[in-house]
Image: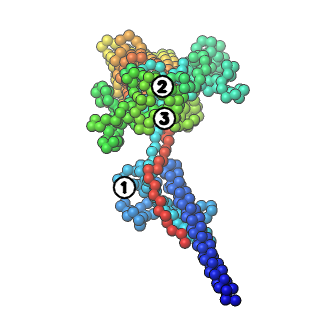
Amino acid sequence: MVLGLFALLILFAFGIAFLSSSTGSVIASKRDYLSARALSVAEAGVERAMSYLRGTAPDGSTDGSWRTGHPAEGPDDHSGDTWHQETLATGESFKICVRTAAGGDTSRIIVTSVSTVTHGDSTASRTLKVLVERDEENVSPWNNVIFGGVGQTGRSIQGNVRMRGPVHLLGDGEEFTDVDGDGHWDDDEPYVDANTNGQYDAGESYTDVDGDGRRDAREPFVDVNGNGIRDPALTVTDLAQEVSGTADVGNNYDGMPVLLQNKLPTLPTVSFGGETVETLTAKMRVKHGRVDISGSAVVGYPNSTGNALKETMDGVYVSDGFGGNQGTAAVNSDNGSSQGYDLGDGIVEFPALGDPKPGYGGTYKDYLRNNGLVIPGSLSLTPGVPYSNSSGGNSISYDGSGNLEITGIVYVDGDLNLNKSPSVQTLMYEGSGTLFATGDVYVHCNVLPQTNFPLTDRLGLIAGAKMEIATGPGDAQLTMALAMYAQYKIKIGKQCEIAGSCVSSYYEMQNVPHLYHVPELPNNLPPGMPGGDPIYVVTISVKSWQDFAGSAD
């Protein structure tokens, strides 16, 4: 009996120990479960705050300015802060505090998320503190020194050119109807020949609205006078851009003539590498096609201190990579050289004149005609030959001595020539206006603002077909500040210094022209420029992350 009682006592002791251990395990398991749930809910609070900063916030703002409210110099323990609280469909809740980080930089934001979860009579909480950085970029075609569309003959840019500022080349290829659904264009499938010349040519079909047996200026027609072939998307074997010799892509105005720089706004500055530097916020984006770099050419320069200039590119996004005898060795970018195109499909497209203009109800070309001063036939602005015309708030006045005053949109139903003479080499413009030619545009003179481009004076040139710059005898060393668009091609024949932006399907460059982006241009465009509406892309990046264990009971 004594031995049996002793055995029972031992079994009882083991049972109590096992029961205690099991109960502790259950409690610990519940706490771990609640803690994991609390962490997930706190992370959901951080993600919700980031979505508000990226899109529409609770106060209705869409510019990332939303903050939950807190004392100007509130303590780190959040006493006195205002919190935004939400309850999830599962019953858990979180509260978030969103405040600007120390130093007053509104792009750097501290998000604190505190979660609360329950299970039965148990509750758990978790706190996360995350430093995020909000970046908003306008990826409009006009926020580039060069924007290229479909490309042609295997290249978006043919020839050497110095480009200072962002470069964006699509190389998408022309749209087509995939009749047999095989995913590629076949010879007998219809396509859109985007490289049209924008004017009626003999033999093209038209609608005889008034029945007079001939095509009148306002009667619609089918513009089939493109290059006559479907231009495909560029591939890895094609050259989206060839950079060689003294050509380069850069992020500053180093080397710009003083005469031209005095006509432009000062560049914005950023803190980089411990110093304040001027920058063009230059990124290179190439959606389709390889970038070949040869000789002494570079894409960005190595960082150098002491000169107040940003040498490296802010980013390089080239899906098909780099070639040439230099390749990636000549790429100097803050994000390296291996990242592919970052904007995907449908965000940025080439703005063809036949595309619908947002908010208008018609095409860009319709808008230009219906809202502009229409000049029948071609127009030449030539020294010694004054010209003046106006209608409906749009006006153009050229005094024959090289001085141009322009307001609004001037629609030229033909070609446009900007000429010079031995005594007048420069066209000086003032006002804000756009010259649109349904045919070709030829520029043979300097084109400069009277005061400042584009804050005070701004001029836009639009070619329905092609634009030729400095292709005539004696046209070398021209200097310009303007916005240029050509549906088909922009050709620069001689060495020029040009500030502004170029938007075209294709480019042909000779003798290394120097092109400089003007960051203020997208916000101060001449009227009616195709693709002029901003396209904002917002990114939120996490810079640091702190997890405070919180509590569970």
Q: Secondary structure at mark 3?
A: loop
Question: What crowding class fits label 2: few (fewer than 14 Cα within 10 Å), some (14-19), or many (20 or more)?
Answer: some
The image shows residue 309, relative to residue 108, as above or below, that is above
Question: What crowding class fits label 1: few (fewer than 14 Cα within 10 Å), some (14-19), or many (20 or more)?
Answer: few
Q: Calculate the distance from the C-alpha at mark 1 to the C-alpha at mark 2.
A: 44 Å
Q: Is residue 365 left or right of residue 208?
A: left
Whichever of callouts 1 and 2 sits on the residue coming sooner in the sequence is 1
Label pair 1/2, CB-CB below 8 angstroms: no
Q: Residue furthest left?
A: 306
Name the amino acid type tagged 2: Gly
Whichever of callouts 1 and 3 sits on the residue coming sooner in the sequence is 1
Rendered location of residue 465, percent (x, y) = 52, 19
Tell me the quarter of the picture where residue 234 sits: top right
Q: Secondary structure at mark 2?
A: strand
Name the amino acid type tagged 3: Ser
Q: Residue furthest right?
A: 180
Tell me the quarter of the picture where residue 150 sits: top right
Front residue of 45/381: it is 45
The image shows residue 288, relative to residue 270, as above or below, that is above
Name the residue carrying label 2: 323
Name the residue carrying label 3: 338
Front residue of 195/46: it is 46
Q: How is the image coloured?
A: rainbow
